[in-house]
Image: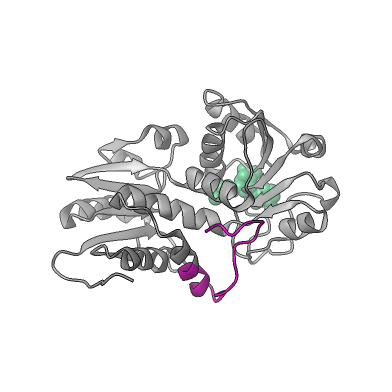
């Protein structure tokens, strides 16, 4: 491990959100800075919506190197920045800000982080695959955009509120073969699919035990992925395992969105393995690996 200390040259990074106390990012990012010997520190700030503008002004005033932005600020922060990367603009959400010589530039690393995690942990090649996405919220938008770059045969987005799935499909249709529709199509779409991804909050603590789909619709040829990481193994993933599916949990997305942010800020390859270890330790799960086929390391 490289030498690491804080001094007058230390560059500050942070995550802002409301709430923020549950964030694993400070533990993960500080471990990454320490491991790579980069003179930087990463804090978490509880910023309410009415404080967002002042927080961004503070970021400029302090010459902070960058920030991560989480719920509920991912959209609202956009007009406060100097520039927004093309993919973040298409997704309509920023989760990473880079301070490049005083200019604040917004990126979205959620979708690409998710795709890197899915590919590394399951070994899947997404080109030509049929993908079903459950949910049409902010999380789904980033995923669909990033999945389109992998050249799938088609992406079907379905949601409890069908109009939101149709709107998302329309917004993303410029980037790939995306269709939207109601849940009534789900059994047939899953039967034809190679990959099923849950982006809804169904199954997340404190509602663990609930699954967004009927276990009877799953089949052994599916890769089943859940972006929820609390619990690490959701009811959906447990059902999928029983059916012989390849399963992929949500913790890798957290790690890899952070790894991309680290790389945008520093230009240094993120130490993904130590980031995994830091997050698992913080969750009281030291020694366990990602939920899924591979090691993700
Ligand atoms: P995020 O930004 O994390 O995606 P979000 O924008 O609030 O969060 O989206 C949450 C998603 O979970 C939505 O697709 C939501 O469906 P609606 O658009 O119909 O609200 C979905 N969701 C939440 N609770 C659900 C439930 N009990 N059953 C089915 N879908 C649910």
Was residue 167 drawn as part of the magenta stretch in this picture? no
- Chosen colour scheme: one colour
Which residue appears at 60% of the width and 62% of the height? 290
Magenta span contains residue 292: yes
At 41% from the left and 60% from the top, the residue drawn is 271
Q: Check the image and name the residue furthest to the top.
A: 174
Residue 43, located in which quarter of the rendered image? bottom left
Instruction: Confirm whether residue 23 shows in the render.
Output: no
Q: Is residue 227 left or right of residue 68?
A: right
Relative image position of residue 124 (x, y in whole percent): 64, 43
Q: Nearer the viewer, residue 105 or 7?
A: 7
Residue nearest the viewer, comparing 92 with 36: 36
Q: Which residues are magenta?
A: 277-297
Rendered view: 26 above or below 53: below
Q: Is residue 295 above or below residue 283?
A: above
* Horizontal relation, residue 5 to residue 45: left or right: left
Using the rendered image of the protein, determine whether residue 223 is visible from the camera's viewpoint: yes
Residue 63 location, x and y as percent? 18, 54
């Amino acid at each position: 491990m490289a030498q690491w200390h804080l001094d007058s040259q230390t560059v500050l990074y942070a995550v802002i959100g409301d709430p923020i106390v549950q964030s694993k990012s400070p533990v993960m990012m500080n471990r990454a800075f320490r491991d790579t010997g980069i003179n930087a520190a990463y804090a978490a700030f509880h910023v309410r919506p009415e404080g967002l503008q002042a927080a961004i002004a503070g970021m400029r005033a302090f010459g902070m190197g960058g920030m991560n932005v989480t719920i509920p600020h991912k959209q609202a922060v956009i007009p406060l920045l100097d520039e927004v990367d093309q993919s973040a603009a298409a997704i309509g959400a920023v989760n990473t800000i880079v301070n490049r010589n005083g200019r604040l530039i917004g990126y979205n690393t959620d979708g690409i982080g998710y795709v890197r995690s899915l590919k590394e942990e399951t070994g899947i090649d997404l080109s030509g695959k049929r993908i079903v996405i459950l949910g049409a919220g902010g999380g789904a938008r980033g995923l669909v955009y990033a999945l389109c770059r992998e050249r799938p045969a088609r992406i079907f987005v379905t949601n409890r509120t069908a109009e939101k799935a149709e709107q998302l499909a329309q917004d993303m249709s410029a980037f790939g073969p995306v269709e939207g529709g109601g849940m009534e199509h789900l059994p047939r779409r899953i039967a034809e699919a190679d990959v099923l991804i849950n982006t809804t909050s169904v199954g997340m603590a404190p509602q663990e035990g609930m699954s967004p789909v009927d276990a009877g619709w799953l089949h052994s040829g599916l890769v089943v992925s859940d972006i929820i990481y609390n619990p690490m193994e959701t009811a959906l993933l447990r059902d999928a395992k029983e059916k012989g599916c390849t399963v992929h949990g949500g913790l890798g997305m957290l790690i890899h969105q952070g790894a991309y942010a680290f790389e945008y800020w520093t230009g240094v390859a993120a130490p993904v393995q130590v980031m995994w270890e830091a997050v698992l330790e913080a969750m009281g799960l030291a020694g366990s690996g990602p939920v899924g086929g591979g090691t993700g390391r």
